[in-house]
Image (cartoon, rainbow, N blue to C red):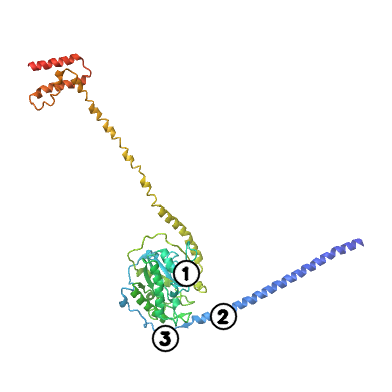
Amino acid sequence: MARKKNKQAAKMPLDIRSKMYIVMAVCSLMLLVSVVISFLLVGGLDRMGTEADSDSADSESLVTESGYDKDQNTIDETKYTSTILEKSDDAGQTYVDETLFLGDSNTARMYRMFDYCSYDNAIGSVGMSARSLADFACVQMKGSSGYVTMAKAVAMMQPKRVILTFGTNDLSPSYSADSFVKAYQEGIQTIVDAYPSVDIIVNSIPPLGQVHSNQNLTQSQVDEYNKALVEMCQKQGWKFLNSAEVLKDSSTGYAKSGYVEASDGIHLTKAAMDDLFEYVRTHSYITEDDRPTVKNVGKHVGDKDVSVSTASTVTTTSSASSTAPTEEPQSESVSQETVVQTPEPTPPPVQEPTPEPATPEPTPVPATPTPVPATPEPTPVPATPTPDPATPVPATPEPTPVPATSDSVPESSAPVDQTNSGTAPENAVVESANEVQDTAQS
């Protein structure tokens, strides 16, 4: 009996545990089901909203301009021959690299989406208008704590020339061409004031697709703005790049087929960029470089966009491409420091070891040979003989009396023999005296 009770007692806890596990499993299953249901509900709503947005976008993309006359605001190039850049030889990639491109999303696409430019020679802010050019701080420079305006960035980057492409985001039925040009001119003037040596080139507003996503944008107004830009450039002495002529379909006046994104009819495709940059290179503007000494060149590393919602048209590759330039400036800054240090080596030329050539002061060595001729001082030795031989010594100046020369010759030979004999005995002196007497007697 005791054993049966023990067995039943042992079975009791197992039954309770199994019940607990079952309850926990059921609760977990119910929780999982509720989460799935909630997710489906939320996802369904979002999907409905997305579909609604896409439907509205599709309906907007079907906006087609009516009443457009492509010949209404054509630019008469004969009136602006000194302003509109004419066709030239291909200036090559160097020309592009020396140019700083400023603009809106189409400019941003040049280096964020495509590789026609880089952060070193382009600055684009998505959604930016010409009205914002004067005071919108949208450029991040290496070493700066915040954003700076494009004018400030130009002064820091010190390019030879700038090509500005603004105007698409200014288009509005209520915004006149005169107001647009006035604001644009003020913005450009801030660049001229910040860096007077830069050449100003204003690019035309690119054409729209015949079907585009914003009903406020019209090709009629694009043409009107471009015509006003040419007149502004002529008055201010700036150059106008009429790139729209290579992007437009001559038969319709709108952008060529495949030159704008099908999703919006506004942003230029790679095919359009190819033609645009070829046009830039073959309509170049090269002047004498009158910039002051270019040093401590600023590095563009980031941008601030006006419209975040449309930033997707530029892609998000900017973050990857912006990190690369941040590393490059380090090497450049180092090179700049070395440039500053290179003049310091000028003291080494003060290596006035040049006085070492002064070591040829051994010139006194030639002075030592001079005493050698002084050795003929043995001449006083002939003076040691009796006063009789002294007479022949003064006979050296006797060249004046011609007859005396014959007498002096043997005398001069005598002293030479004395120098050679060294210390001669006194008998030699006596003999020389006797010879003198004999000659005298003869």
Q: Give the label, 2 or 1, closer to the camera.
A: 1
> Looking at the rendering, which quadrant does residue 430 occupy?
top left
Pointers 2 and 3 in contact (C-beta within 8 Å): no
x 41%, y 54%: residue: 340
- Of helix, strand and loop, which one carries label 1? strand
First in residue order: circle 2 vs circle 1: 2
* Mark 3 nearby-residue class (10 Å; few <14, some 14–19, many ≥20): few
Give the x, y percent position of residue 223.
Answer: 39, 79
**420 horizontally vs 158: left or right:** left
**129 horizontally vs 284: left or right:** right
x 36%, y 46%: residue: 350
383 shown above or below 312: above
Determine which residue is flagged by label 3: 67
For residue 137, the mark is: 1
Determine which residue is flagged by label 2: 52
Marks 2/3: CA–CA distance: 30 Å
Give the x, y percent position of residue 289.
Answer: 34, 63
Going by the numbered disc 2, the residue's amino acid type is: Ala
Quarter the N terminus occupies = bottom right
Give the x, y percent position of residue 248.
Answer: 39, 77
437 shown above or below 118: above
- Of helix, strand and loop, which one carries label 2? helix
